[in-house]
Image (tube, rainbow, N blue to C red):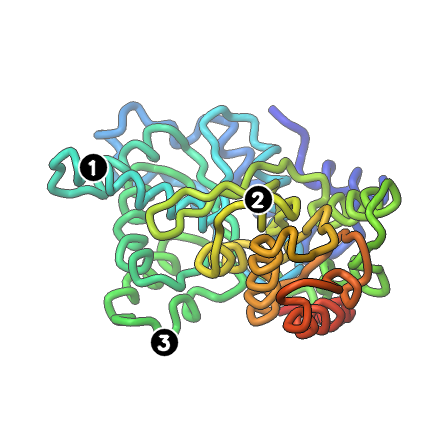
Amino acid sequence: MGPPLTETYDRMVAAGRLVADPAQRAALAGLEARRLWLEAGAGRRRGLLAGFLRRPPEGPGGLYLWGGVGRGKSMLMDLFAEGVAIPERRRVHFHAFMQEVHAGMHAARRAGTDDALAPVADGLAAACRLLCLDELQITDITDAMVVGRLFERLLAAGVMVVATSNRPPEDLYRDGLNRASFLPFIALIRDRLEVRELATPTDWRRLKLAGAAVYFQPLGPAAKAAMDGLWDALTGGAAAAPLVLAVQGRRVELGAFAAGVVRAGFWDLCGRPLGAADYLALAAAARVVMIDDIPRLSAANYNEARRFVTLVDVLYEARTRLLAAAADRPERLYLEGEGSFEFARTASRLIEMQAADWGG
C-alpha cells in the first residue's frame, strides 16, 4: 500500500516543486478515499461477465474533476494514478484514448463484428480497474456518438473512471451537431461520477510563466537548460510519453507529452510531411507546445519553413501557449530566399505569443 496522497503532496510542497493550494489539497482527500478503496481490493471483479450481471460495487465511485486551465487538475491526476498501488490501472490523455477506441472499433468492423464498440469496451474493462482520463473534451461528433455507450459499459463492469476537464459536464459538446443524442452522457456523468470543481482562483501554469522568458536564442546549452527548466516546472515531474495523434487515418507520433504539455524538436514537427490537419490535432491535444532547435530558415529548407509557418498560424489561432528555442530572434530567423517576405507575419506572431497574458 502506498503512502497517503496528501503526504506526497506535502513533500512536493516542502521540496519547492509545488506551491500549497487549499483547493488542490481538498480534492486530494476525495482521491485518497478512492485509493484506499482500490488498494483494499474492494470491488474486485470475479469475472467480466459478472460485472455486467450485477449492480456495480458499492464504494466511492468515479470522479469528474473540472476547473479552469492551469489549476492543477493533471498534476492531481498524476499523483493519484501513480499513488494507487494496483497493477490494473491506466492513465491516458482523453484525446489519445478516443483515438485508440476508434482504431479498435475499425479493427472490429473489419473482422465482421456487428457491435464494434463491445469488444473494445470489454477489452478495456478486462485490463483495468482504474481508468484515469486527462482533459476530457468532446469536439468531434464521432467521439460524441461513442463516448456515452463506452462509459456506460465500463462503469457497468466496475471500472472506476476518474476524469479531468476544463468544462463542467453541461458544457461538453456545447452547440455540437446532433447534441440531443449526447445529453444522456451528461446525465450518466452526473449520476455515476462525483462531479467536483477545482475552484482555485490561481492559474498555476500561467503563474509559472509570468515574467519568465518563453523564447530562447541562440541555440546552445543555455537555451536547452532554460527549456528543460520550464518543462520540469510545467509538468511537475510527471511521467512523459509520446503524443500519438490519429489524423485522417494516419498515426502521428510527436515528442514527449505530460500534463497537457508537448515538447518536440523542429525537425520532428516540420521535417516530416505534416500539414494543417496534423497541427490542428496537436493544438487540440496540448495546452502548451515547446519547440526545440528551430534553425535559421532559407531556401535551403523551404519546405520545412512553410510547415513552420503553418504550425505557428495554427497555434496562434488556437491561442496555444508556445515556448521555443531558436537560432535567432523571430525577425531574424528567415532573412533570405523565397518566402522570407511573407515570414514577417510569422515573426510578428512569434513575438506576440511571448506576452505574459498569451494563451487560452
The residue at 60%/33% (across/down) is 82
Q: CA distance from mark 3 to mark 2?
A: 32 Å
Is the residue marked by circle 1 packed among few (<14), some (14-19), or many (20+) residues within 10 Å? some
Instruction: Answer yes or no: is residue 105 visible.
Output: yes
**Residue 98, position as x, y percentages in the image:** 38, 48
Depicted 83 relative to depicted 266: above or below: above
Relative to 98, is 216 on the left or the right? Answer: right
Q: Amino acid at mark 3?
A: Asp
Which comes sooner in the sequence, label 3 or label 2? 2
The residue at 85%/51% (across/down) is 218
Q: Amino acid at mark 1?
A: Ala
In the structure shown, which secondary structural element does the residue marked by tag 1 occupy? helix
Which comes sooner in the sequence, label 3 or label 1? 1
Viewer-proximal residue among 25 and 209: 209
Q: Amino acid at mark 2?
A: Leu
Disc 1 marks which residue?
A: 108
Image quadrant occupied by the C terminus: bottom right
Depicted 267 relative to depicted 343: above or below: above
From the image, state whether disc 2 or disc 1 is nearer to you.
1
Relative to 224, is 171 on the left or the right? Answer: left
From the image, state whether disc 3 or disc 2 is nearer to you.
3
Q: Which mark is residue 31?
A: 2
Instruction: Answer yes or no: is residue 68 visible.
Output: no
In the structure shown, which secondary structural element does the residue marked by tag 2 occupy? helix
The residue at 63%/27% (across/down) is 2
Q: CA distance from mark 3 to mark 1?
A: 31 Å
Viewer-proximal residue among 170 and 23: 170
Which comes sooner in the sequence, label 2 or label 1? 2
Viewer-proximal residue among 276 and 23: 276
**Residue 346, position as x, y percentages in the image:** 66, 69
Disc 3 marks which residue?
A: 175
